[in-house]
Amino acid sequence: MEQGLRFAAIDIGSNAMRLLFSRVIVKENEPPYFIKESLIRMPLRLGHDVFTTGIISEKNCDSFVSTIVGFKYLIDAYNPISYRACATAAMRNSANGPDLVKIIAKTPGINLDIISGQEEAAMILSKNMNQYLKTKKNYIHIDVGGGSTELTIIVEGKKITSKSFSIGSVRLLENKVQESHWEFLCDWIGKNTSSLDSIKGIGSGGNINKIASMLGKNKGKSVHYNDINQIIKKISMKNIEQRITELGLRPDRADVIIHASKIYLNCMNWSRAKRIIVPQTGLADGIVSQLYDDYKNYSEKIT
């Protein structure tokens, strides 16, 4: 099976929409090898509308549908075995989110799943991430998006508990996070990690990926709390334009990266995690992993 198996995933977040094309190489007696063939990112900030007005604006609804139509053309050209589209916090909290689901189900014919925070965390923490975990160690998985943060506690290789919190980089940008939200997050982390002797973070999300890249870290390497603090101080000294032109940040990253970093640093501090592993995988990767598992299970049943 030299050509591999093709899958596609659509991730509709609060800060951007992504389309991932992935090929899975399968060889006998070896784990599957996932190749990211292409990742297309549309900087459509649905969270700005939802977290300030409660609905997605007419303008962004039109942009959303146009983007989905474009994605569908590309998916048809790629011709994957299967694909799945998932939406997270912005669509979960939008009053007109269900209406958009109905619209794109007709044109261009894509079934969009608005998933829960728990399902989002479970998919991100897929089998692909197992290679970065040691069975005798403890971890706190921190996934920071534009509209929410998903935390999962892993003790000696087993997922113990997970929780979705309404704290995200875009929510912070729009001043929609209250002190009580932080207190609830801090209490939950303390309750679920205080008994652990040691713990390490696992970070997912575009902002922690960018921070790791700026620190010269390769995929799967860990980053120290102090190093994140230092790079954020450097970024904070620049205005938005300087972050774009001098540091190479995208416009829709430049204004939220400080806010996202605050979430990672607080979670690390409250859990006593000094280092955080950055596998550079996200929801789209988790969707592909799930699609491959479904395909494999189905193939085994019919053979």
Image (cartoon, rainbow, N blue to C red):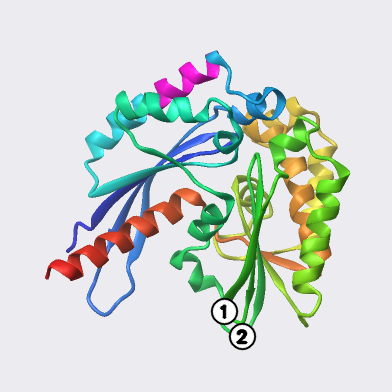
Q: Is residue 65 magenta?
A: yes
Q: Which residues are magenta?
A: 59-68
Q: Residue at x 54, y 19 (%)?
A: 60
Foreground pick, 174 / 5: 174
**In which image quadrant can residue 33 be found?**
bottom left
- Per the model, the C-alpha gap separating discs 2 and 1 is 7 Å
Q: Are marks 2 and 1 in contact (CB under 8 Å)?
A: yes
Q: Is residue 263 left or right of residue 101?
A: right
Residue at numbered disc 2: 136
Q: Is residue 234 left or right of residue 20?
A: right
Q: Residue at x 36, y 60 (%)?
A: 34
Percent x, y of residue 257:
71, 41
Quarter of the picture containing the N terminus is bottom left
**In which image quadrant can residue 2 be found?**
bottom left
Q: Is residue 212 above or below residue 57?
A: below
* Residue at the extreme bottom: 136
Q: Name the disc covering residue 88, or none.
A: none
Q: Amino acid at mark 2?
A: Lys
Q: Is residue 225 left or right of residue 160?
A: right
Quarter of the picture containing the C terminus is bottom left
Asked if residue 266 shows in the view, the reply is: no
Foreground pick, 54 / 46: 54
Foreground pick, 120 / 241: 120
Residue at numbered disc 1: 157
